Image (spheres, rainbow, N blue to C red):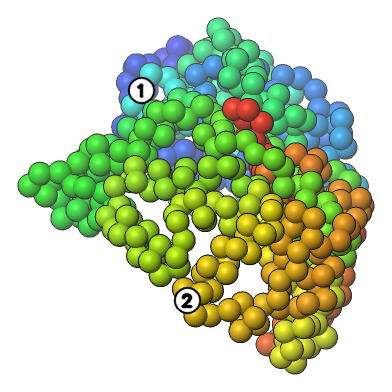
């Protein structure tokens, strides 16, 4: 391991950016706001240049060597990495996908064969006279990078920027040159800042002491061997272009930060702040450090979260996994969505657990919000319903909002409700729902047909829509689930308890451009059309499997 070290202090690998700077003891805490910010001052410019270069590590198709989680310690509180895994050819997939959209293609100005490291680094080095990518960066820059917060036993986690290096000596000289350039060109104020170069990674922190402590702690027990990190990483699956992890200990630090926020506010400000949040203040106008109640309890129970951004199959995917927050697992709504007509342009569906309404009421009551019971009592009188039981029955086992593929040719089409292919689809015994709707109509003196809304029933389904033709089509079994676009946008839809799907490969794309064109000039309208052209569909699914919740968002392109 190689350190950047002042001659008189061989054990303190710190760059002093101010002549009077003295490295602090390893156990000292950085409590001030200025020193607690990640890569403040000079570090910000280094991030622009080095971080940008690291981000371009995805130009490598054969990533090798240790990952940041092999170097960071198990006490890491949060981590975000940049890494294109060669198994999926992510670099090529990413550029192919992004270049399909003219706005992104023109702003990026890059081809799939370009070296993105050169592209991004030279953007930053444009201010540094005498420095070039070929001579000052390329010889030592590695293939991976990360930004992290690490618990070193202080009040706040220590910030860290990691950059993989292939030549430790070259990295030291290159970083020194870039720092000198940043100070001369931007005139940044002095700031505590230090780095250490290990066998595989350059570690930058708010002091050299912290940088070295992070590297040494990682050698004793690294994050990759931590059981919780392994659990969430396995749930995420394949690595992507961007990957992130937040450890359970983040809840503790956030809770302490909230305590400090309330405790540090002047009395009147604290009262206003707590009033906005519906919280109770302390005595004599002082902030109540326990006022966040349930919020802090939730942070104490935080079990960690992880995610990845991936490019594949001509599209983009964001996956986030974490602990199930106590929601009951229900029958997937995806099975019902899959039976919609194949030309469905939009659907938002949700599975309904048997006690969903009671769960929501319990949470509201736990917040001790005044007036809830009186509101429910008044609603029962006005509607004739027995709450919450009738509301639970009315929701059924699943509920969906859908829009059909027959797009309007113009605004005048909306004058006739029959031309509006939108509907609310409820799964469950339709007769039960119709009985409850009839009770509400009688008490309110207003019928659905007066709106006008028509109802259609089918096998275990009730449809409400302004269009009788569209409503009738939804009582029959369709083939949306077998369409290629739906499968690419919503993988594993049959497992989803929550699902959203938006397709623009139908007449709706032209309809959107035409409708928006009334407020755009011809050039802007053409640009909108060109950027919508490659967009195939947006899919979002939420799944609960035991104690694990999974959120997945995909953009599929044509």
Q: Residue at x 72, y 65 (%)?
A: 463
Residue situated in front as seen by the camera: 533 or 32: 533
**Residue corresponding to mark 1:** 154
Q: Residue at x 57, y 69 (%)?
A: 438
- The quarter of the picture where the N terminus appears is top right
Q: Residue at x 44, y 28 (%)?
A: 301
**Residue corresponding to mark 2:** 444
Q: Is residue 212 left or right of residue 369?
A: right
**Taking 437 as reference, is 168 above or below it?**
above
- The quarter of the picture where the C terminus appears is bottom right
User: Residue 95 at what x, y percent from top left?
Assistant: 84, 50
User: Residue 349 at what x, y percent from top left?
Assistant: 69, 54
Residue 212: mark = none
Residue situated in front as seen by the camera: 446 or 270: 446
Q: Is residue 314 left or right of residue 147?
A: right
**Taking 464 as reference, is 11 above or below it?**
above
């Amino acid at each position: 391991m190689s350190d950047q070290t002042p001659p008189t202090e061989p054990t303190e690998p710190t760059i002093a950016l101010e002549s009077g700077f003295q490295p602090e003891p390893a156990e000292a805490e950085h409590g001030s706001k200025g020193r607690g910010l990640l890569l403040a001052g000079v570090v910000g410019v280094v991030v622009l240049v080095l971080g940008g270069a690291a981000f371009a590590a995805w130009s490598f198709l054969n990533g090798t060597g240790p990952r940041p989680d092999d170097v960071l310690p198990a006490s890491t509180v949060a981590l975000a990495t940049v890494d294109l895994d060669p198994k999926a050819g992510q670099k090529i997939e990413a550029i192919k996908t992004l270049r399909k959209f003219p706005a992104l293609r023109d702003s990026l100005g890059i081809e799939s064969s370009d070296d993105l490291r050169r592209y991004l680094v030279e953007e930053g080095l444009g201010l540094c006279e005498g420095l070039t990518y070929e001579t000052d960066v390329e010889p030592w820059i590695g293939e991976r990078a990360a930004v992290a917060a690490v618990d070193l036993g202080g009040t706040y986690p220590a910030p860290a920027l990691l950059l993989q290096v292939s030549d430790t000596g070259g990295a030291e000289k290159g970083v020194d040159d870039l720092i000198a350039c940043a100070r001369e060109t931007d005139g940044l104020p002095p700031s505590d800042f230090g780095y250490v170069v290990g066998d595989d990674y350059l570690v930058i922190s708010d002091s050299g002491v912290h940088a070295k402590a992070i590297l040494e702690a990682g050698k004793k027990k690294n994050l990759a061997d931590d059981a919780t990190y392994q659990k969430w990483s396995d749930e995420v699956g394949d690595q992507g272009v961007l990957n992130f992890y937040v450890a359970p200990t983040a809840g503790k630090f956030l809770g302490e930060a909230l305590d400090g926020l309330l405790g540090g506010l002047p009395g009147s400000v604290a009262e206003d702040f707590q009033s906005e949040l519906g919280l109770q203040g302390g005595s004599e106008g002082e902030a109540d450090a326990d006022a966040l109640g349930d919020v802090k309890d939730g942070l104490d129970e935080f079990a960690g979260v992880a995610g990845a951004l991936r490019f594949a199959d001509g599209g983009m995917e964001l996956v986030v996994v974490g602990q199930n927050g106590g929601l009951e697992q229900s029958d997937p709504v995806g099975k019902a969505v899959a039976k919609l007509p194949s030309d469905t342009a939009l659907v938002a569906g949700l599975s309904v657990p048997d006690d969903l309404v009671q769960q929501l009421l319990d949470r509201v009551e736990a917040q001790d919000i005044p007036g809830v019971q009186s509101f429910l009592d008044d609603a029962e009188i006005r509607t004739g319903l027995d709450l919450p039981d009738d509301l639970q029955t009315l929701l059924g086992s699943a509920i969906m909002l859908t829009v059909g593929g027959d797009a309007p040719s113009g605004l005048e089409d909306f004058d006739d409700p029959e031309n509006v292919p939108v509907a609310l689809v409820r799964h469950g015994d339709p007769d039960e729902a119709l009985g409850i709707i009839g009770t509400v109509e009688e008490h309110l003196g207003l019928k659905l047909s007066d709106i006008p809304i028509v109802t259609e029933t089918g096998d275990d389904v009730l449809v409400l829509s302004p269009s009788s033709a569209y409503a009738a089509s939804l009582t029959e079994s369709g083939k949306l689930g077998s369409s290629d676009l739906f499968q690419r946008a919503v993988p594993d839809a049959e497992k989803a308890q929550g699902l959203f799907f938006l397709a623009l490969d139908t007449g709706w794309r032209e309809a959107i451009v035409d409708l928006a064109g009334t407020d755009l000039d011809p050039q802007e309208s053409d640009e909108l059309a060109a950027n919508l052209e490659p967009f195939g569909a947006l899919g979002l699914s939420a799944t609960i499997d035991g104690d694990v919740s999974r959120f997945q968002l995909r953009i599929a392109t044509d």
